[in-house]
Structures are given as structure tokens and as C-alpha cells.
């Protein structure tokens, strides 16, 4: 990652996690490292050479974001973090991997919650460790325990408008939408570069309206939560790679999440989301599974 990582102190874990998981869906990319090279004093002297003038790297223009927004298919990984911003290792709350094809349309989402979330809630949320596939006609879930009760791991949750995602604590998904693209489209003003190097350019951004937060089905129906999200702005960064590599999107939701949940967040704590977006990839198979059971066989399993 190109931003300092964060670490979460166990003393404030339960309070913050319970508050945030009441609002958010309990649903990484490569980290660059560098080092100094130490020359040997025993090396033989060499003839003096003409000095080499280093060319300063050119900033990747912000307009390059449009290349990503125009992508019809791709893949991204989202990770939610909670902890103080002190540059040490972080605690991940949840992560998800999404493949999308906006032309089909097709949205394939796998969610994994951390042990910290399970500990705070006292149970593993039903929406964790499962996979959801949504098209404009149907929403399917690949649920491990369904094999025993349904004869297949794939279960039909109903059409995209009226499905049973709320049973998993999830709000509906439009398969044509791409969450990090919605965040990029919600940026206020003209982002300014804060660092330019050979790897790419880091831009400072401000995101409006809680774009990128994933409220639970209950929070999404709460007028107070929706009002809080609509009037909020969140700081963040975008890293645009100079060559091949994912776009990195980082947003700090500390203030907005605290306001929406009524949770008192310690001064040194922060809640962030990170997306790593890859559109430089081959097309993938969007065929639906051949064996799918009806939702009725799963009703008792997720309650």
C-alpha cells in the first residue's frame, strides 16, 4: 500500500466493532518495500564519470481516472480497517473480492470477516465466507451449509429487485454499479497530487455523501443514518500507477461512521476502507451454475 498502515489496540476493540458492525456490512494488494544499499569501502576506485542528470518523474494526470471509470469489466479487492494511524500493522475488519461485468451485467462478490468481527458480535454473521452472484434477473448465493439441506451449494435468492439479501444483513446490489467507481465519481473538487515518483502519483481527495460505505439492510432503511451519510464528506487518497498495476483508493470514514452509529471513537483511532482496482485483466466466465436450489430450502439456515 502507499499509505501508512494502522493498528488497532485491543482495549477499544469490542466497543468500536459492535458499533460499526451495526452500520456496516460485515462482509490487499501488494505492499512495496524498499531499502538502502550500502557500498563497500574495499571496492577498487574507478575512473571518474560524467555526472548523470536524473529526470524528475512526470505526474500521472488525474484524467487517467476516466480510463478506470470507463472499464466494462474488472476486479477489485476491498478491505476495511480499524485502528490508530501510527504506521504499524493493521487489524482488518472484513475483506471482499468482486468481479464485475457491466455489460452482462454480472456482479460476483465473495465476503470474508475477520476474527475480530466474529469476537465482537459473538457469532459469525451469515453473510461471511459466502459468495453472491447478481445479474439483472437473479441473485444467487453459494452457501457452504446448503449442500446438506438443498443438495447444492448454490441457492436462488430471487430477482434483483426482491431478493433475500436482507437475511444475510446485506443491502441490495445493482450489478451495473461498481462501488469504487461510485466513490471516484463522488469526489469533491479537483484532486491535487501530493507525491510523484517513478511508481505513480498520489492524489489527495474528498469524498461526498458516504460513498463507499456499505450499510446493512437495517441501516439503509434508517432515515437518520441516511441523513448523516448524505451530508458528510470523507478525506482520502488515490494512487494512480505510472505503469501496469492497480489503482489504489483509500478513504477515511472515521467521522461519518462515528456520527451514524453514535459510537465514541478514541482520538487515535480511525476507520478506513481500501480498494485495489484492476481493469488490466482477461475477460472471465459469467455463466451461472447449472444446479441451483430454491430459497425455501435455506430459510432455517440463516436465522
Image (cartoon, grey):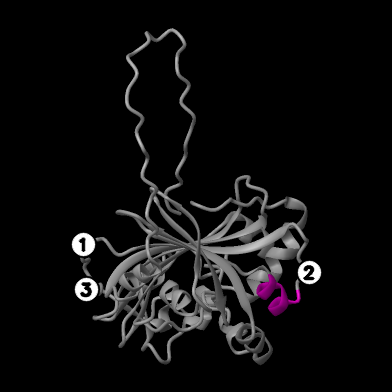
State the residue position of label 3: 287
Which residue sits at x=58%, y=51%?
4
Which residue sits at x=36%, y=45%?
55
Q: Quadrant of residue 210?
A: bottom right
Q: Residues within 10 Å of mark 1 (few under 14, many from 20)?
A: few
Between residues 131 and 209, which one lies in front from this camera angle?
A: 209
169 in magenta: no
State the residue position of label 2: 264
In the image: residue 64, left or right of residue 36 = left
Find the magenta span and give its range.
Answer: 255-262
256 in magenta: yes
User: Against 179, is 283 above or below?
Assistant: above
Residue 77, position as x, y percentages in the image: 42, 61
Q: Which mark is residue 185?
A: none
In the image: residue 144, left or right of residue 217 = left
Residue 38, position as x, y percentages in the image: 48, 21
Q: Secondary structure at mark 2?
A: loop
Which residue sits at x=63%, y=76%?
23
Q: Secondary structure at mark 1?
A: loop
Q: Is the C-beta separation of discs 2 and 3 under 8 Å?
A: no
In the image: residue 111, left or right of residue 58 = right
Q: Residues within 10 Å of mark 2 (few under 14, many from 20)?
A: few
Q: Secondary structure at mark 3?
A: loop
User: Against 54, is 247 above or below?
Assistant: below
Gap in angstroms between the C-alphas marked 2 and 3: 46 Å
Of labels 1 and 3, earlier in sequence is 1
- Which quarter of the rendered picture does the C terminus lie within? bottom right
Gap in angstroms between the C-alphas marked 2 and 1: 45 Å
Residue 29, position as x, y percentages in the image: 43, 53
State the residue position of label 1: 282
Between residues 138 and 253, which one lies in front from this camera angle?
A: 253
* Residue 303 at least partly seen: no
Amino acid at each position: 500500500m502507499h499509505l501508512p498502515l494502522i493498528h488497532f489496540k485491543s482495549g477499544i476493540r469490542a466497543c468500536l466493532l459492535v458499533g460499526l458492525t451495526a452500520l456496516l456490512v460485515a462482509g490487499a494488494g501488494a505492499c512495496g518495500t524498499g531499502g538502502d544499499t550500502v557500498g563497500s569501502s574495499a571496492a577498487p576506485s574507478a575512473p571518474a564519470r560524467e555526472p548523470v542528470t536524473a529526470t524528475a518523474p512526470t505526474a500521472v494526470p488525474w484524467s487517467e481516472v476516466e480510463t478506470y471509470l470507463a472499464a466494462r469489466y474488472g476486479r477489485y479487492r476491498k478491505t476495511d480497517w480499524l485502528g490508530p494511524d501510527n504506521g504499524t500493522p493493521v487489524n482488518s475488519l472484513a475483506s471482499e473480492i468482486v468481479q464485475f461485468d457491466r455489460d452482462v451485467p454480472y456482479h460476483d462478490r465473495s465476503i470474508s470477516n475477520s476474527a475480530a468481527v466474529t469476537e465482537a458480535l459473538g457469532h459469525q454473521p451469515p453473510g461471511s465466507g459466502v459468495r453472491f452472484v447478481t445479474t439483472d434477473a437473479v441473485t444467487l448465493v453459494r452457501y457452504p451449509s446448503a449442500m446438506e439441506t438443498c443438495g447444492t451449494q448454490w441457492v436462488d435468492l430471487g430477482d434483483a429487485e426482491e431478493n433475500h439479501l436482507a437475511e444475510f444483513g446485506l443491502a441490495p446490489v445493482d450489478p451495473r454499479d461498481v462501488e469504487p467507481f461510485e466513490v471516484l465519481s463522488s469526489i469533491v473538487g479537483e484532486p491535487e497530487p501530493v507525491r510523484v515518483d517513478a511508481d505513480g502519483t498520489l492524489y489527495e481527495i474528498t469524498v461526498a455523501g458516504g460513498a463507499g460505505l456499505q450499510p446493512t439492510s437495517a441501516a439503509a432503511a434508517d432515515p437518520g443514518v441516511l441523513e448523516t451519510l448524505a451530508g458528510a464528506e470523507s478525506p482520502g487518497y488515490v494512487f494512480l500507477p505510472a505503469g501496469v498495476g492497480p489503482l489504489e483508493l483509500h478513504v477515511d470514514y472515521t467521522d461519518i461512521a462515528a456520527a451514524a452509529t453514535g459510537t465514541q471513537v478514541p482520538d487515535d483511532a480511525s476507520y478506513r476502507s481500501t480498494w485495489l482496482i484492476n481493469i488490466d485483466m482477461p475477460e472471465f466466465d459469467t455463466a451461472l451454475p447449472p444446479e441451483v436450489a430454491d430459497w425455501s430450502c435455506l430459510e432455517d439456515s440463516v436465522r
